[in-house]
Amino acid sequence: VQLQASGGGLVQAGGSLRLSCAASGRTFNDYTMGWFRQAPGKEREFVAAFRRSDLSTAYLDSVKGRFTIARDNAKNTVFLQMNSLKTEDTAVYYCAARPGRIITSQLRAISSYDYWGQGTQVTVSS
């Protein structure tokens, strides 16, 4: 499985961006797609996830109500719509995939995901 992330850029605080993650290669009936981010000098953190088995989503508390994760099955692409961006959202954003089942407690763990995209830079200016 190959993941290609795109859509990052420079935006002013309060603005919006939509990240895309295109998947290619082997496909799976059940999977979870996640977005993570890593700011300079900080550890990579969970941002959002979409679980195919029950169509559920999960979010980092600080992005709830501002970010939305969605999937386009026809295009094998997952999106992260980011609105009302803040300077603290500045980071490299990575998409990740986990084939097969995943329990809720594992959704936010980096170690739960088997495949990773290359990252896309998001910079929010004040």
Image (tube, rainbow, N blue to C red):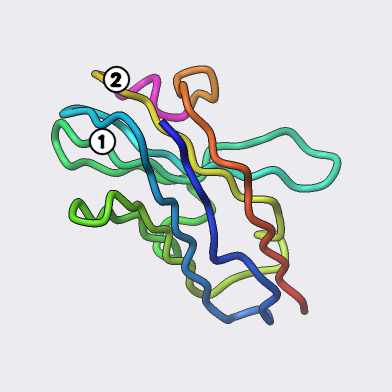
Task: List x then y, in percent, for residue 32.
Answer: 31, 32
Q: Which numbered disc, 1 or 2, marks the residue that appears first in the sequence?
A: 1
Residue at (50% x, 43% y) in the render: 95
Closer to the camera, 51 or 62?
Answer: 51
Q: Quadrant of residue 55?
A: top left
Tag on residue 51?
1
Q: Is residue 48 left or right of residue 10?
A: left
Q: Is residue 100 above or below residue 94?
A: above
Judge whether 102 appears above or below 61 on screen.
above
Which residue is at a point 20% across and 51% down the rendered structure image?
A: 73
CA gap between label 1 and label 2 equals 8 Å
Circle 2: is it few (<14), some (14-19), or many (20+) Cα within 10 Å?
some
Identity of the amino acid at label 2? Ile
Q: The disc labelled 1 sits on which kind of residue?
A: Arg
**Which quadrant would the N terminus be assigned to in this image?**
top left
Residues in magenta? 104-108
- Does the CB distance between marks 1 and 2 fall below 8 Å? yes
SS assignment for the magenta stretch, majority = helix
> Where 50 sits versus 110, above or below?
below
For mark 2, give the secondary structure: loop
Query: Alpha-carbon neighbours of circle 1 within 10 Å: few (<14), some, or many (≥20)?
Result: many
Q: Is residue 39 above or below residue 33?
A: below
Residue 42 is situated, as x and y percent measured from the top left of the image, at 78, 38
Residue shown at the point (44%, 51%) measured from the top left: 21
Q: x%, y% of residue 112?
A: 45, 19
Residue at x 83%, y 46% (from the top left corner): 40
Q: In this rendering, would 86 be left or right of 60?
A: right
Label drawn at residue 115: none
Q: Is residue 21 shown in magenta? A: no
Residue farthest right in this picture: 41
The foreground one among 126 and 20 is 20
Task: Kindly identify which numbered label has been placed on residue 102.
Answer: 2
